[in-house]
Image (cartoon, rainbow, N blue to C red):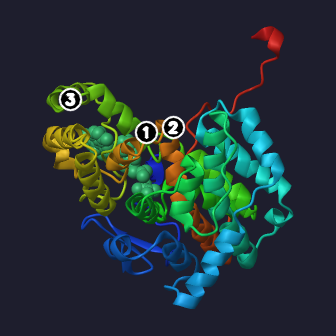
Amino acid sequence: MSDTVKINRGLKGIYFERSGVSHIDGAAGTLTYRGYSIHDLATHSTFEEVAYLLIYGELPTAEELAAFSARLKAARTLPNEIHAIIAATKDGHPMDVLRTAVSALAALEPTSQQVGEQAFIENGIRLTAQVPMIVAAHEAIRNGRTPVAPDPALDHAANWLWMLKGEKPSAEAARLADVDFILHAEHGSNASSFAARVTVGTEANLHGAIVTALSTLAGPAHGGAAEDVMKMVQEIGSPENAAAYVKAKRANREPVTGFGHRVYRAEDPRARHMRDGVKALSEEMGQPEWYEILQAVVEAMKPYARHGLNVNVDFYSGVIYQLHGIPMDLYVPIFAIGRVPGWVIQCIEQQRQNILLRPLTLYNGPEERPYTPIENR
Ligand SMILES: CC(=O)SCCNC(=O)CCNC(=O)[C@H](O)C(C)(C)COP(=O)(O)OP(=O)(O)OC[C@H]1O[C@@H](n2cnc3c(N)ncnc32)[C@H](O)[C@@H]1OP(=O)(O)O
Ligand SMILES: O=C([O-])CC(=O)C(=O)O
């Protein structure tokens, strides 16, 4: 039997479900949310509108959007215990602190135990509002400051920057953060969304699924790549060192972070917007070398592009955050802030027609054998 079974390692190329949320054409390098091009959404939409679109399936009317925004703002609250938990874990990586705080919310908020579509929507909206609060509160607490209270006059992205920095962001900075969240909001059956679906498949609650998703996003092969790209850029230090860096990595058969994707063979369509952002921002801030190093790495990677190896969404985002003075270990949590609505809708889809996700591993261990008592081993 073991010779005839085909094993799809990493579940590469396997369809396990249908989804009406986002469509990725990896060969063409296109991405749509609910049928709308990511380019149109990044150019014309807002994160709040995109979150509504993802959760409810249609773009909102002005009235619907106002009501949705009001719900998000009303959900900007955290139980007092969360600040104590953050304080107790403040020296950990922000992803660990965020995951711990979301897990604590599951125990502290009575509605977290409810399952079903309405409960997932309600809890999903709460978590969308609470995740940025947790990340900003951690940044304040670990620097000896009191967390900044949310400002109901500000939308999701501007309020996040306000809570993070304690000063009102410029319109440009707020828009850049908003676009970043739009680009990260949803991406089909990526590893963290798939992991969240596995959790929901056991009829567990949404908070548990988001904890699973946060754990899975953190790794350097997924959301952790932006932090690694920034470390790489710092190590390279200057554009003329990029070719030697890439050559050494490839000689050791090590991946160059920020490149490659399970689905895209053309360039990740989200990268274009981040690239434009880095270029404009690094020139505006008189630090063009950041953009130049990234582009030198792209140039040095061209000989390896035969696999369809291109930059992914994480390649440019880290430098944008760096130019905004955001600490490197907050890059993955920023991804998570944007991804919450995507996780929520993937979980809602999963529980609509729920089925336990439970694939098989083909056994290749020892044949059945007699147990040896410990004194005889
Ligand atoms: C938001 C996101 O999650 S986007 C992804 C963020 N992650 C990164 O940027 C980390 C770097 N990239 C990678 O590690 C990988 O490309 C992954 C994990 C994203 C995808 O992995 P897979 O789909 O399993 O790709 P796979 O490993 O099969 O690669 C196919 C080929 O491209 C090569 N390749 C893939 N990624 C890279 C890379 N970053 N640098 C150099 N070569 C690469 C592989 O060596 C392999 O070559 P081979 O056929 O000669 O052995
Ligand atoms: O789709 C993937 O495998 C990873 C990714 O780009 C994302 O989650 O945004």
Query: Of the residues shown, which amino acid type is indicated by label 2?
Result: Asp
Q: Residues within 10 Å of mark 1 (few under 14, many from 20)?
A: many
Vertical relation: 252 (above or below) 88: above
Q: Residue at x 64, y 68 (%)?
A: 152
User: Does dot 2 land on a helix, a strand or a loop?
Assistant: helix
Is label 3 in a helix, a strand or a loop? loop
Callouts 1 and 2 close, C-beta under 8 Å: yes
Mark 1 and mark 2: Cα distance apart in space: 7 Å
Position in image of residue 348 (x %, y %) = 64, 72
Q: Are marks 1 and 3 in contact (CB under 8 Å)?
A: no
Q: Position of residue 318 (x, y in %)?
A: 38, 44
| Quadrant housing residue 264 | bottom left
User: What residue did someone put label 1 on?
Assistant: 227
State which tag comes first along the sequence, 3 or 2: 3
Residue beneath the point at 62% across and 58% down: 196
Q: Nearer the viewer, residue 366 or 29?
A: 29
Q: Nearer the viewer, residue 33 or 230?
A: 230
Which three-letter amino acid code belongs to the residue tagged 3? Ser
Q: Secondary structure at mark 1?
A: helix
Can residue 74 be seen here? The reply is yes
Q: CA distance from mark 1 to mark 3?
A: 18 Å
Q: Residues within 10 Å of mark 3 (few under 14, many from 20)?
A: some
Q: Residues within 10 Å of mark 2 (few under 14, many from 20)?
A: some
Q: Which residue is mark 3?
A: 238
Dividing the image into 4 quarters, which one contains the C terminus?
top right
CA gap, disc 3 and disc 2: 22 Å
User: Residue beneath label 2, please?
Assistant: 329
